[in-house]
Amino acid sequence: MKREIVKVIALIIIMCFTTSVNATITDVSIVPSLPTPMDVIFINVLGQESSGPVFIEDTDFRQDGMSLELDISLDVGPFLVITPWSHTENIGTLPAGVYDLTVNTIVELEPFRNDTSFTTFEVVPEPGTLVLFGLGGLIMKNFINQKIT
């Protein structure tokens, strides 16, 4: 009986230290949800790791034109425990336009599996900018019409 208990305990320990785990991203959101060029933008990332505990070691945010990428390096524990994690990255302000965002989780140790999430969001022009643009168009139209007549 003792021998079977020892075998089961040994098997559990081996599984805890050798099982493949996943660094899964469960949600990516932009705050505020409809940012303007005047808003400071945050990327909120939620995820879960099947090997706890989880610590965020480092992040790396890059921008290439309208393409944004955020790498989140995770340090994970040795135990087979599903552990939720979250991270908020301040990316500052962006000009108006449509942006593609890629978020990657990175776990350096094998046999860990990394995850990638893709999303698109728009930075909308300030309402005041639109009003000024519209007024400028009306003024130019009147100016052009006066020159023609």
Image (spheres, helix red, strand yellow):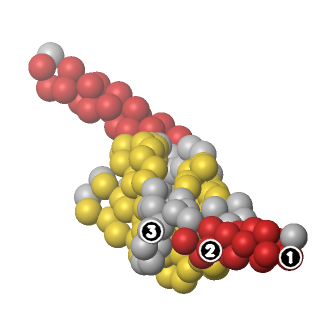
Q: Nearer the viewer, mark 3 or mark 1?
A: 1
Q: Are marks 3 and 1 in contact (CB under 8 Å)?
A: no
- Type of residue at label 3? Pro
Which mark, residue 14? Answer: 2
Front residue (pair 60, 82): 82
- Mark 3 vs mark 2: which is more N-terminal? 2
- Mark 3 vs mark 1: which is more N-terminal? 1
Front residue (pair 7, 40): 7
User: Could you tell me if residue 82 is visible in this image?
Assistant: yes
Label 1 crowd (10 A; few <14 / some 14-19 / many >=20): few
Identify the residue at image location x=45%, y=77%.
Answer: 109
Q: Nearer the viewer, mark 3 or mark 2?
A: 2
- The quarter of the image holding the C terminus is top left
Among all residues in the image, which is located at the extreme top? 149
- The quarter of the image holding the N terminus is bottom right
- Cα distance between the residues tagged 3 and 1: 32 Å
User: Could you tell me if residue 40 is visible in this image?
Assistant: no
- Cα distance between the residues tagged 3 and 2: 14 Å
Label 3 crowd (10 A; few <14 / some 14-19 / many >=20): few
Residue assigned mark 1: 2
Residue assigned mark 3: 111
Identify the residue at image location x=62%, y=74%.
Answer: 14
